[in-house]
Amino acid sequence: MQTTKLSSKGQVVIPGTLRKSHHWQAGQELVVIDVGDGVLLKSGDVFAQTQINDVASCLKFTGKVRSLEDMELAILKGVMEKVK
């Protein structure tokens, strides 16, 4: 376990080994989550939040419509080919 100190400005230095293992660079946005007896730091969103209507137009499909049964059979076929 590594330790660090809180500065008078409320800043904390994250040890280099942790920054390196999480691929965090200077300027990295982190989400701070209160977990009761401490805080959890997680990487911020890499992509801006969007709504499904903003991106659904890229999902156009012009092929033959497949049923759920067709998809399950294709998955089974793929699994069987891997097993052989």
Image: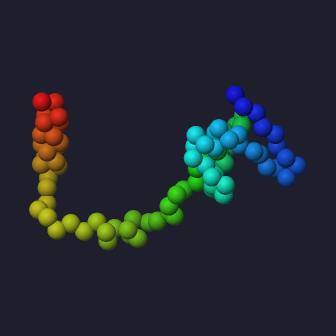
**Residue visible at 61% across and 43% down in the picture:** 20
Residue 19: percent from the left, percent from the top?
A: 64, 44
Residue 24: percent from the left, percent from the top?
A: 61, 49
Horizontal side of residue 49 vs 14, given as left or right:
left
* Of residues 36 and 45, the one drawn nearer to the viewer in this rendering: 45
Which residue ends up furthest to the top in the rendered image?
A: 1
Residue 40 can be seen in this image:
no
Residue 29: percent from the left, percent from the top?
A: 63, 56
- Up-down relation of residue 41 to residue 27 (above or below): above
Residue 23: percent from the left, percent from the top?
A: 57, 47
Which residue ends up furthest to the right in the rendered image?
A: 8
* Of residues 18 and 55, the one drawn nearer to the viewer in this rendering: 18
Q: Quadrant of residue 4?
A: top right
Quadrant where the C terminus is found in the figure: top left
**Residue visible at 16% across and 40% down in the picture:** 78
**Residue visible at 44% across and 66% down in the picture:** 51
Q: Quadrant of residue 82?
A: top left
